[in-house]
Image (tube, helix red, strand yellow):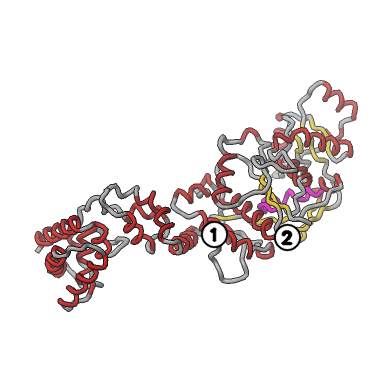
């Protein structure tokens, strides 16, 4: 059996973290087994379609490396891969179900259904269609169809017995048929509901493993009744528990939770996002936490998927993102960080490659970069109190003495580079017989006017160059002399 998995998103907006995880697990299982990964667009709910969403789905999968073998843009032997283009197929199979007595036409209008819903709510009962139209005589049904009375097609759920199914994560689950609703299979516009279309499509596309969220567990018995009615082989079910913001709340865009695109905009690397999402509800069976996509394919197994909901921990994602950043080759980090550096640095006399070098080991996410560089274009106004550091054993007086000693040393430097600056400044430290912080803390403060910077005093002097560094040191001396 060749493994065939599918990702079947609805084009209704952004790519939710949970959706991306579903796509990732389906991709990993297909690649692990040298199978096929199929992209199918489920657009039967035309009213909820958001313009540009299909392109967003393509772009997200491409950016994250989840390449598909068959789909709307690539074709394949099982197309069309967009559901609204498969409308005649669904009608054909719906009619087969009606002939078998497994489905029936329902002519109830919205008003009657709302009355039924209200009645059940008053009795604190969940909504279930009462089966009124399944009792209609065949002649009456034909007359209504001939007259063009609006209708849907409903599944005829048995009222007795139970339906059981096996899931790779949750094991065997049995549900009493009496608890199941006669769900709508084909809507009044002739398009199928998700619950019908996914069964037909998964069978016709020969999907072997249906990987989706655990919110579909309750609907799976209805799917199995359809499979059984057609005499089709039931696929392997893999239901993944929900991704939660905390113990009580699911991730929700409505509540401000980030989508994949939001995380990219916040400066997270796509490789880190994919890595972290893989760990939301899956355990490799080891203590290892950092994986490339190729390594995830090798390590992934369905047995590692947990039944427990996964809590999205943005701090863990940030830590993991930092690991990916620090392992990037310097050239790649520079190219990746450059757009973020340019948001803060407009001066043309600054060597941006030197800026990226000091950022490389000090960046957790790319969006941190502009805030770390807000002193480069212009020295901010700052308080002399920044020169006080108990740890470095400096205060305003000691810092003033240090800057007065640093200034002539740097004025005499003719070859301005990191190596020369390091040698001359540490020679000064040795000559004055002081801790390095006594010299380096005032130097960094004078050059940046900030308490925290991505680089130390020597690195910043190398970045600024001779004239700007000397100018800022002289300004620091002037500031401290006013408070002396």
Residue occupying image coordinates x 82% and y 44%: 157
Could you say which quadrant of the image residue 165 lies in?
bottom right
Q: Is residue 375 magenta?
A: no
> Which SS does the magenta portion mostly show?
helix
Name the mark on residue 276: 1
Query: Does residue 456 appear to the left or right of 179 in the view shown?
Result: left
Q: Secondary structure at mark 2?
A: loop
* Distance CA(mark 2)–CA(mark 1): 22 Å
Task: Report x, y in % for residue 188.
Answer: 74, 30
Binning the other alpha carbons within 10 Å of mark 2 as few (below 14), some (14 to 19) or many (20 upward) gives some
Q: Secondary structure at mark 1?
A: helix
Could you say which quadrant of the image residue 139 lies in?
top right
The region drawn magenta spans 210-225
Task: Report x, y in % for residue 211.
Answer: 69, 53
Task: Report x, y in % for residue 410.
Answer: 16, 64
In front of the other: 144 or 412: 412
Name the mark on residue 168: 2
Query: Does residue 403 appear to the left or right of 233 in the view shown?
Result: left
Q: Farthest residue to the front: give it.
A: 415
Task: Report x, y in % for residue 76.
Answer: 71, 43
| Residue 298 vertical position relative to residue 366 in the rendered view, above or below | below
Residue occupying image coordinates x 63% and y 61%: 297
Q: Nearer the viewer, mark 2 or mark 1?
A: 1
């Amino acid at each position: 059996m060749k493994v065939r998995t599918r990702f079947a998103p609805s084009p209704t907006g952004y790519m939710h973290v949970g959706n991306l995880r579903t796509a990732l697990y389906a991709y990993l299982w297909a690649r692990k087994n040298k199978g096929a990964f199929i992209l199918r667009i489920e657009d039967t709910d035309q009213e909820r379609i958001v313009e540009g969403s299909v392109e967003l789905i393509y772009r997200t999968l491409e950016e994250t490396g989840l390449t598909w073998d068959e789909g709307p843009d690539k074709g394949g032997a099982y197309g069309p891969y967009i559901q609204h283009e498969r409308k005649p197929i669904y009608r054909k199979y719906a009619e087969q179900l009606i002939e078998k007595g497994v489905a029936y036409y329902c002519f109830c209008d919205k008003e009657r259904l709302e009355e039924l819903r209200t009645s059940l709510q008053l009795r604190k009962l969940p909504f279930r269609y009462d089966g009124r139209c399944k009792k209609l005589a065949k002649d009456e049904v034909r007359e209504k169809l001939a007259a063009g009375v609006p209708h849907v097609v409903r599944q005829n759920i048995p009222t007795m017995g139970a339906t059981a199914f096996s899931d790779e994560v949750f094991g065997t689950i049995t549900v009493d048929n009496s608890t199941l609703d006669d769900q709508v299979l084909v809507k009044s516009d002739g398009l199928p509901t998700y619950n019908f279309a996914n069964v037909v499509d998964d069978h016709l596309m020969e999907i072997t493993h249906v990987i989706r969220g655990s919110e579909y567990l309750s609907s799976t018995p209805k799917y199995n009744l359809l499979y059984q009615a057609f005499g089709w082989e039931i696929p392997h079910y893999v239901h993944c528990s929900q991704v939660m913001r905390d113990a009580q709340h699911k991730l929700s865009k409505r509540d401000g939770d980030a989508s994949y695109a939001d995380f990219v905009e916040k400066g997270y690397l796509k490789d880190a996002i994919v890595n972290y999402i893989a760990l939301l509800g899956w355990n490799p069976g080891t203590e290892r936490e950092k994986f490339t996509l190729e390594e995830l394919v090798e390590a992934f197994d369905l047995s590692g998927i947990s039944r427990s909901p996964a809590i999205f921990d943005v701090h863990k994602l940030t830590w993991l993102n930092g690991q990916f950043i620090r392992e990037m080759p310097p050239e790649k980090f520079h190219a990746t960080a450059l757009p973020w550096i340019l948001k803060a640095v407009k001066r043309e006399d600054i060597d941006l490659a030197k800026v990226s070098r000091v950022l490389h080991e000090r960046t957790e996410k790319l969006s941190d970069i502009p805030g770390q560089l807000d002193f480069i274009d212009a020295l901010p106004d700052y308080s002399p109190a920044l020169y006080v550091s108990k740890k470095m054993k400096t205060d305003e007086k000691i810092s003033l003495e240090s800057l007065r000693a640093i200034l002539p040393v740097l004025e005499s430097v003719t070859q301005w580079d990191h190596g020369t600056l390091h040698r001359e400044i540490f020679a000064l430290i040795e000559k004055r017989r002081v801790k390095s912080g006594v010299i380096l803390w005032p130097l960094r403060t004078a050059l940046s006017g900030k308490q925290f910077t991505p680089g130390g005093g020597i690195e910043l002097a190398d970045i600024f160059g001779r004239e700007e560094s000397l100018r800022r040191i002289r300004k620091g001396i002037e500031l401290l002399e006013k408070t002396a």
